[in-house]
Image (spheres, helix red, strand yellow):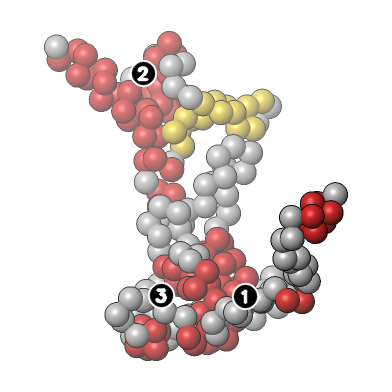
Amino acid sequence: MQLRRRIQANEPLKKKQRATDVATPPPPPATHELQFMGSLPQDLFFATIGSPTWGLLAVQDLVALSLVSRSFYNAMDDAYWEKTLAHPTFSSICNGAAYTDLTPRERAVRLVAKRVCKHCRQFRQYEFWPLRPHGRKILVCEECKKLPEFSAIHFSRAVYKYRLKRCQLELLPSWKRSAYRGYTVMFNLKDVLDLVEQIKQYKSE
């Protein structure tokens, strides 16, 4: 119908555009051509700040940096992570059975997930076990586990040591831990210390 109208109106016919006539977009630039550092040359960055052997960033910072943008992700490829994990700090760890089937990037991610404390952000030579496997699965190092916010205290000790009453402790969140012939109620030590401080302030008013 439209063709007949064009013929009657003496309009020039338009040639249909084939799929092969459409210009294909240019390929993405190669990794070495990516410019994502502004005025700072990329090779200079990876030779200094982002050096996998003696740079200024820890492994957890390097993993976070690789997720900033697609350019960083592509630039920090498997060859980069292979060189990073060849450092004596990581080489003995990555030879374990849990790392053999992983790519270099996946090994770095696992190192950060399993051996970087979620509190102090320090890398440790041992893997962390969940602080409370059946509750809040917080992965912190042995040093941070001693801090009040990650320590636990059972009901009877809180009553005896801080002279607290049952009605006062019932205001705090708690969980149960298996014990001889039953269970014991556990509290977060920091919550108990905060409660003791609040009671002292209330009595001083």
Query: Which x, y percent locates residue 146?
Result: 40, 48
Which label's residue is closer to the chain start, 2 or 3? 3
Find the distance from the CA under tag 1 to the CA under tag 2.
72 Å
- Residue located 37% across and 28% down the image: 192
Residue in front for this viewpoint, 161 or 130: 130
Give the residue pinned by disc 1.
25
Which label's residue is closer to the chain start, 1 or 3? 1
Type of amino acid at the residue the image marks with label 2: Leu
Mark 2 lies on a secondary structure that is loop
Residue in front for this viewpoint, 23 or 26: 23
- Residue located 34% across and 85% down the image: 41
Mark 2 Cα within 10 Å, few/some/many (few <14, many 20+)? some
Type of amino acid at the residue the image marks with label 3: Phe
- How many numbered markers are drawn? 3
Give the residue pinned by disc 2.
164
Front label number (1 vs 2): 1
Which label's residue is closer to the chain start, 1 or 2? 1
Disc 1 to disc 3: CB gap under 8 Å: no
- What's the mark number on residue 36? 3
Find the distance from the CA under tag 1 to the CA under tag 3.
21 Å
- Residue located 46% across and 64% down the image: 68
Front label number (1 vs 3): 1
Mark 1 Cα within 10 Å, few/some/many (few <14, many 20+)? few
Query: Which x, y percent locates residue 8?
Result: 79, 55
- Quadrant of residue 200 within the rendered picture: top left
Query: Which x, y percent locates residue 168?
Result: 39, 14
Is residue 176 positioned above or below 202 on the image?
below
- Quadrant of residue 113 within the rendered picture: bottom right
Disc 1 to disc 2: CB gap under 8 Å: no
Find the distance from the CA under tag 2 to the CA under tag 3.
58 Å
